[in-house]
Amino acid sequence: MAAVLTGDLVKSTALTSSDYQHTMSALTRQCEAIKARTGCLYEIFRGDGFQFVFEKPEDAVTAMLELKLYLNSQIDGLQVNCTQALATGSDAVIKATPGTSSGKVFVESGRALDEARSGEIVVRTPLAEQQIATGIICTQLSYILNRLSKKQADLLYHYIHLGFPLHQVLAEQQQTSRQNISERLKAAGGDLLEPFIHYVTNLKDDAG
């Protein structure tokens, strides 16, 4: 099983040269951090595009959310958005880099990215009966994530990055009350992230 995540930055050509370089350096750092944690392969290409190959779907969908929140909250002075498309399959031929690898799953991930609305997260499933519900869920979650303030995105980034810790852990980290963290997480849609990861991870990959 391979999970292929393909994405690109939104409106990167509108960034100044300095902001673009700053953004790409931040993207590279986050990609390296994801690689160190999961053992995935990744490649940055076309100036603002990127692609990952994961062995575990759970790592892929977690990285998809984490990367979106990271770009939206962890770059000084900037909120950068990205479009991402995830596909899974067992037919992949994995080489040294995503660019030299092949298989239907790579085609599906790239095609889903081309068809996605700007800033959306998309999950392509093998079964048609799953795709309708999955598409609706992704559209709704994208709507929520794309309307977060930088402060809200920062909170959700740390929530997912720390593996969905107890709210008290975040409260101590941010020097506030547990109730404040709980209310802010709920208002930002933080309670949707872990169920979304579980849902995508458990999608069937064949008719059986």
Image (cartoon, helix red, strand yellow):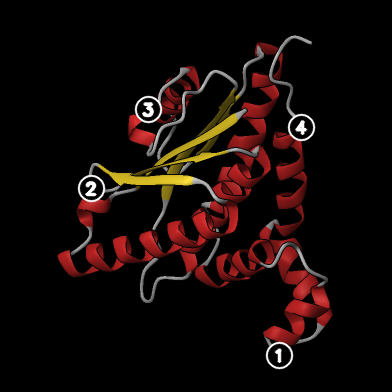
Q: Disc 4 and disc 3: Cα gap in Å?
A: 25 Å
Q: Are marks 1 and 2 in contact (CB under 8 Å)?
A: no
Instruction: Check residue 114 in the rendering and tell me which mark sits there, or answer none.
Output: 3
Q: Quadrant of residue 114?
A: top left
Question: 2 above or below 47?
Answer: above
Q: Which label's residue is closer to the chain start, 4 or 2?
A: 2
The quadrant in which the N terminus is found is: top right
Instruction: Check residue 202 in the rendering and tell me which mark sits there, or answer none.
Output: 4
Q: Residues within 10 Å of mark 4 (few under 14, many from 20)?
A: few
Q: Is residue 142 left or right of residue 95?
A: right
Q: Amino acid at mark 2?
A: Gly
Q: Are marks 1 and 4 in contact (CB under 8 Å)?
A: no
Q: Which label's residue is closer to the chain start, 1 or 2?
A: 2
Q: Disc 4 and disc 2: Cα gap in Å?
A: 33 Å
Q: Disc 1 and disc 4: Cα gap in Å?
A: 36 Å
Q: Which label's residue is closer to the chain start, 4 or 3?
A: 3
Q: Amino acid at mark 1?
A: Gln
